[in-house]
Amino acid sequence: MKTKISILLVLFIFSMVAISCSDDDDVEKQHGELNVKVTDAPSDDANIQGTFVTISEVKIDGQVVEGFTAQTIEISAYQNGNTKLLVNETLEAESYNSVSLVLDYENDAEGNSPGCYVLTDDDNKHALEAASSSTTEVTFNKPFQVEANGMTDLVIDFDLRKAIVRNEDGGDSEYKFVTSAELTNSLRIVQEDECGAINGEINNHTEAEGELVIYAYKKGSFDAETETQGQGNSQVMFANAETSAKVATDGSYKLSFLEEGEYEVHVASYEEDANGQIAFTGMVQASSSISGLLLNNVSVEANSQVNLNIDLSILADL
């Protein structure tokens, strides 16, 4: 009799443990959705018709996203707040720390060569590649949380102005990616619901010669002497800008996906040189045409837009 009771007691305890483990599993298996999107800040080269990149893998905390198939994206088509959905993935609801993209220089999504390239106005493809490898993995260290039954939207900003430069080395291609370290710095990742935007118009834009580009910097970080000179191995100008935007023919502009914080805005002038490349001609003295707003003290809040109309003066001395 005692033996039978002992067996029943063991079975009861085992069943309770199993139920408890099952409950724990249910908690552990709560999930949420992660969307990873891409956007672009424009190139400053007038000869470029489009820029294409092939992403062969996406990784979350170093783990390959299963089911992701290679995508070749005309990244230059997604500017001024427009995005392209790259990944929609269901993940366990927990904290994550990084997103990685693997760029395939050799083959596009259909197996054709090259995988990453610039398309110029004469419809020629100019391969973008690295000297030592057919692929490059770019990792963004960005802590983020996937909430149970929630949705997290991350946006990766390809700043083509920083990422691609003219090839002065005499190679087969007229363009090339910057160095690996500079490439990582030319891309940034933000959480969409933590961002706002600055937009508006240049009231007297027709008085300016050539093209105008607007740059957003974290407040206090702009140094004209440094930023208007080429920096690093690839001689990238305005290397520390958070983002930039070309002023449209109607005078409008939009600086998108700025994380909440304090910013300053600067305007530069460019003209096309004999080679068809847009060349920097100088900074433009500018001021806000909206009472109470200063170009060197623009507060951006999440999920909001700051309307900042600008009056131009003259080219500033550098």
Image (cartoon, helix red, strand yellow):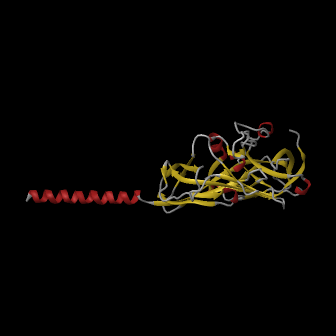
Q: x, y percentage for residue 221?
A: 73, 41
In front of the other: 123 or 90: 123
State which quadrant residue 141 falls in: top right
Q: Is residue 279 visible?
A: yes
User: In the displayed structure, does residue 218 sit left or right of residue 66?
Assistant: right
Image quarter (top left, top right, bottom left or bottom right) of the C terminus: top right
Counting from the top left corner in percent of width and height, residue 104 is at 58, 50
Snapshot quadrant of residue 281 = top right
Nearest the viewer among 60 and 163 is 163
Q: Is residue 288 left or right of residue 184?
A: right
Residue 118: x, y in percent?
A: 69, 52
Residue extending farthest to the left is 1
Q: Is residue 292 left or right of residue 73?
A: right
* Image-based side of 114 in relation to 207, left or right: left
The N terminus lies in quadrant? bottom left
Q: Nearer the viewer, residue 63 or 194?
A: 63
Is residue 259 visible to the viewer in this orientation of the structure?
no
> What is the total number of numbered labels drawn onto the structure image?
0
- Which quadrant holds residue 52? bottom right
Residue 230: percent from left, percent from top: 76, 38
